[in-house]
Image: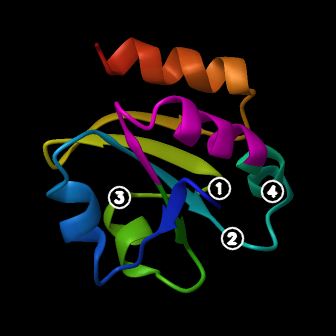
Amino acid sequence: MGHIQAVGDDDFTSMVLEADIPVLVDFWAPWCGPCKAIAPALEAIAAQYSDKIQVVKINVDDHTQTPSQYGVRGIPTLMLFKGGEVLATQVGAVTQAQLTSFIDAHVKD
């Protein structure tokens, strides 16, 4: 998790909603196979887009308030936030290419 930070209910507002750049939030859990499957792609994206977005992970088992607030029902769920608002949501495991397309569609140079 070199380029990815962990976030929780207590610091979600400061780290995500008040961030100066768009933030991609990975709602995940340690027991979730698809969550583990997309982890390398997320790490690569975090490194590739380090000047454009921040990537954070929130463990839905340890932090239940935030996923509930945003209606997360399945994991992995990826939400892209900008200016405190959800720009886009992707539910389920995706490839790195799909993740790149997802981000490029919403984050302009």
Q: Residues within 10 Å of mark 1 (few under 14, many from 20)?
A: some
**Would you say the residues marked 2 and 1 are in contact, meaning their CB atoms lie under 8 Å apart?**
yes
The quarter in which the N terminus is drawn is: bottom right
How far is the residue under mark 1 from the one under mark 4? Answer: 11 Å
Between label 2 and label 3, give the one nearer the viewer.
Answer: 2
As drawn, the label of residue 70 is: 3
Mark 2 or mark 1: name the one nearer the start of the chain.
2
Mark 4 or mark 2: name the one nearer the start of the chain.
2
**Pick the front one: 60 or 23:** 23
How far is the residue under mark 4 from the one under mark 3? Answer: 22 Å
Name the residue type under label 3.
Tyr
Q: Which residue is mark 2?
A: 29
Look at the numbered disc 1 and give the secondary structure of its residue.
Answer: loop
How far is the residue under mark 2 from the one under mark 1? Answer: 8 Å
Q: Which residue is mark 4?
A: 36
Q: Residues within 10 Å of mark 2 (few under 14, many from 20)?
A: some
Name the residue type under label 1.
Ile
The residue depicted at 65 percent of the width and 56 percent of the height is 75
Please provide percent x and percent y for residue 62.
Answer: 55, 86
Look at the numbered disc 3 and give the secondary structure of its residue.
Answer: loop
Mark 4 or mark 3: name the one nearer the start of the chain.
4
Which stretch did the figure color magenta?
A: 40-55
Q: Which residue is mark 1?
A: 75
How far is the residue under mark 3 from the one under mark 1? Answer: 13 Å
The residue depicted at 32 percent of the width and 21 percent of the height is 107
